[in-house]
Image (tube, rainbow, N blue to C red):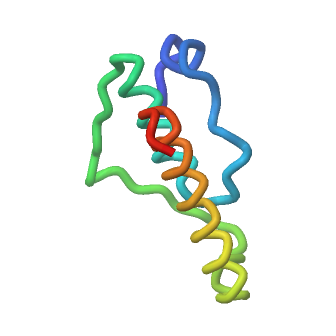
Amino acid sequence: MIRREAWQQVGSLDEGFFMYFEELDWCRRCREADWEIHYLPAAEILHHEGKSSEQVVTARTIRFQRSKIRYFASTMARAGRR
């Protein structure tokens, strides 16, 4: 969940990420814009679909690593350290 004002300020999730690290990027952008991030460990989400990442383990691993590289490359570029 995100406040409308925060979403309008920082924008939506980056669609350049495929399934991994997009929420980490979003939280970082919110934090950089001085919004607070709260973790609610008691919150639960029930997902009724797919489990698509379990079907092709190799593809999942590749996508995860690509997203990780994309995320860390973007944070290093923002810090001015390429």
Q: Is residue 44 above or below residue 65?
A: above
Is 14 situated left or right of 21 in this image? right
Q: Position of residue 41 (x, y in %)?
A: 26, 53
In front here: 15 or 81?
81
Could you say which quadrant of the image residue 74 lies in?
Answer: top right
x 64%, y 29%: residue: 12
Task: Give the tally of numbered discs.
Answer: 0
Residue drawn where x is 64% and y is 84% of the image: 54
The image shows residue 32, relative to residue 17, as above or below, that is above
Residue 62 is situated, as x and y percent measured from the top left of the image, at 66, 77
**Residue depicted at 64% across the width and 59% down the height:** 19
Q: Residue at x 46, y 47 (%)?
A: 24
User: Of residues 40 and 27, which is closer to you in this image?
Assistant: 27
Taking 72 as reference, is 77 above or below it? above
Coordinates of residue 25 in the picture (x, y in percent): 50, 42
Horizontal side, residue 71 vs residue 79: left or right: right
The answer to which of 81 and 61 lies nearer the viewer is 81
Looking at the image, residue 31 lies above or below residue 17: above
